[in-house]
Image: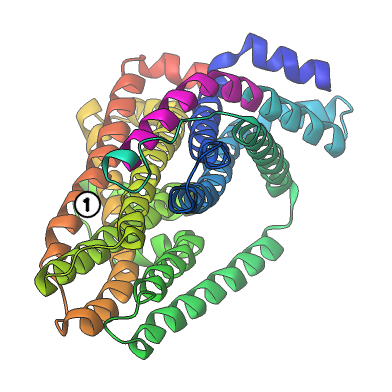
């Protein structure tokens, strides 16, 4: 199975392009920030600089690890679902489930290793540029020299390969595991995250306006709530579409498609919810804190500057990862429907009507993701704003929310329509025959 995995990657590299891109970005982020540990361990590094570098590497490195796993898991899940017929054929030929798992895991590890090697050079440049940002802002001394050492290399290789192997194992297992048991465990995790998020946001009222840790419960609560909503993505999408009285052929067909494919589209909706909630909450909370400090006439401390830098960095990383995930998932999900589009055209639908259906589907996905992502973000923003400024909703919320919504809509609709237009270039008869 190991040799088969290598041949599969070598002869069909296009299938693994999305996984390679996720591994490349993930390894790059992990090595870029963990190189700050190597830098902090250098000679003649003062205590303040070492603390700043270590905190940044630890916080963002932790987020990066989770994002690597999530990104690779999403792309591999789509890949395995598209290969269901191939895997079933191998089983009919005598392959055991364990052999199939080893093959898929071997493919994922080989692709992840290639992505890690390619990411080493950009990670060095990124780490050096990041150190320059810290030095320009006065958070790290100018005398500190950049180092890219064993911590960055080992963490990048280990995190990326383990994430790829674990995600591939779970993707194959998900195909054969009993759906009822999986749904029950997912619901339990979702309700647990929602309960913990609600408790965290409510605990914000127990702090005073001058507490340094005031932002933590609000931010963590918003993140946990978004995770809970994301885990319930399929159920939320089904509930929303069940109450949409859309008229017209495109609207009716779009709603029906979303209801039938809610499980397959859950990964896309998860990305939209997490992106909207985390980016909106983090940027708005930071804006409220910065405005409050400026109004008081105080100067930001080094810890406050570190927190601000980390917030913007985390949001930037999440935005890039989620955009990559959305593009990969939407491209795979739309390209996989070539036979469906061909059948619709043979039944009398014009290409414009097919594109209209795809556009309505993308719009409904965006609205649903933004809706629940905004609810999670507001659950953290409102308590923090009330305690910090005595207001209820800050002015900074609307600009941030509009910007994040515009990015989500542009990526979702742009990728879906561009991919659908490309698929429709194939003649209808050819699309049906090829997919069959």
Q: Which residue is nearer to you in this view: 313 or 324? A: 313
Magenta residue span? 112-134
The residue lying furthest to the top in this view is 11
In the figure, 154 relative to 16: above or below? below
In the figure, 15 relative to 392: above or below? above
Q: Is residue 410 toward the left or the right of residue 5 in the image?
A: left
Q: Is residue 130 magenta?
A: yes
Residue bearing the label numbered 1: 405
Q: Is residue 134 toward the left or the right of residue 403 in the image?
A: right
Q: Is residue 273 toward the left or the right of residue 157 in the image?
A: left
- Residue drawn at (82%, 21%) of the image: 2
Residue 140, horizontal then vertical, whole percent: 38, 44
The quadrant of the rendering that contains the C terminus is top right
In the figure, 80 relative to 283: above or below? above
Mark 1 closeness class: few <14, some 14–19, many ≥20 residues within 10 Å = many
Residue 143, horizontal then vertical, whole percent: 40, 35
Q: Is residue 436 visible?
A: no
In the figure, 152 relative to 379: above or below? above
Q: Which residue is nearer to you in this view: 303 or 374? A: 303
Residue 387, horizontal then vertical, whole percent: 25, 84
Q: Is residue 200 visible?
A: yes
**Element type where label 1 sits in the image:** helix
- Residue drawn at (45%, 50%) of the image: 56
Residue 391, horizontal then vertical, whole percent: 14, 81
Q: Is residue 171 toward the left or the right of residue 374 in the image?
A: right
Instruction: Report which quarter residue 350 is drawn in.
Output: top left
Q: Is residue 254 magenta?
A: no
Report the number of numbered marks: 1
Secondary structure mainly formed by the magenta segment:
helix
The residue lying furthest to the bottom in this view is 206
The quadrant of the rendering that contains the N terminus is top right
């Amino acid at each position: 199975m190991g040799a088969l995995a290598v041949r599969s990657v070598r002869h069909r590299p296009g299938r693994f392009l999305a996984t390679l891109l996720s591994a490349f970005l993930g390894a790059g982020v992990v090595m870029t920030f963990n190189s700050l540990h190597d830098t902090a361990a250098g000679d003649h590094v003062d205590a303040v600089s070492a603390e700043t570098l270590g905190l940044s590497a630890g916080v963002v490195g932790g987020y990066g690890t989770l994002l690597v796993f999530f990104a690779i898991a999403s792309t591999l899940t789509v890949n395995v679902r598209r290969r269901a017929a191939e895997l079933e054929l191998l089983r009919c030929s005598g392959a055991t489930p364990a052999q199939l798992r080893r093959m898929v895991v071997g493919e994922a590890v080989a692709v992840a290793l290639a992505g890690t090697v390619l990411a080493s050079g950009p990670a060095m440049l990124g780490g050096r540029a990041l150190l320059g940002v810290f030095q320009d802002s006065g958070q790290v001394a100018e005398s500190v020299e950049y180092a890219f050492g064993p911590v960055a290399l080992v963490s990048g290789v280990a995190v990326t390969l383990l994430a790829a192997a674990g995600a591939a194992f779970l993707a194959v297992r998900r195909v054969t595991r009993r759906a009822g048991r999986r749904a029950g465990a997912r619901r339990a995790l979702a309700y647990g995250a929602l309960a913990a998020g609600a408790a965290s946001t409510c605990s914000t009222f127990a702090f005073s306006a001058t507490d340094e840790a005031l932002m933590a419960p609000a931010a963590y609560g918003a993140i946990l709530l978004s995770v809970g909503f994301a885990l319930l993505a399929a159920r939320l999408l089904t509930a929303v579409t069940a109450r949409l009285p859309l008229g017209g052929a495109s609207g009716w067909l779009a709603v029906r498609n979303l209801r039938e494919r809610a499980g397959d589209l859950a990964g896309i909706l998860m990305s939209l919810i997490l992106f909207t909630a985390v980016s909106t909450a983090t940027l708005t909370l930071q804006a409220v804190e910065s405005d409050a400090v400026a109004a008081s006439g105080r100067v930001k401390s080094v810890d406050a500057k570190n927190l601000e830098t980390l917030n913007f960095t985390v949001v930037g990383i999440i935005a890039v990862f989620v955009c990559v995930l959305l593009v990969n998932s939407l491209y795979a999900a739309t390209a996989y429907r070539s036979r469906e589009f061909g059948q619709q055209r043979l039944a009398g639908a014009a290409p414009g009507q097919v594109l209209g259906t795809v556009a309505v589907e993308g719009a409904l996905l965006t609205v649903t993701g933004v809706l629940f992502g905004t609810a999670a973000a507001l659950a953290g923003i409102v308590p923090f704003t009330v305690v910090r400024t005595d207001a209820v909703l800050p002015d900074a919320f609307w600009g941030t929310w509009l910007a994040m919504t515009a990015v989500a809509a542009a990526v979702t609709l742009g990728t879906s329509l561009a991919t659908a237009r490309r698929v429709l270039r194939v003649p209808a008869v050819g699309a049906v025959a090829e997919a069959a």
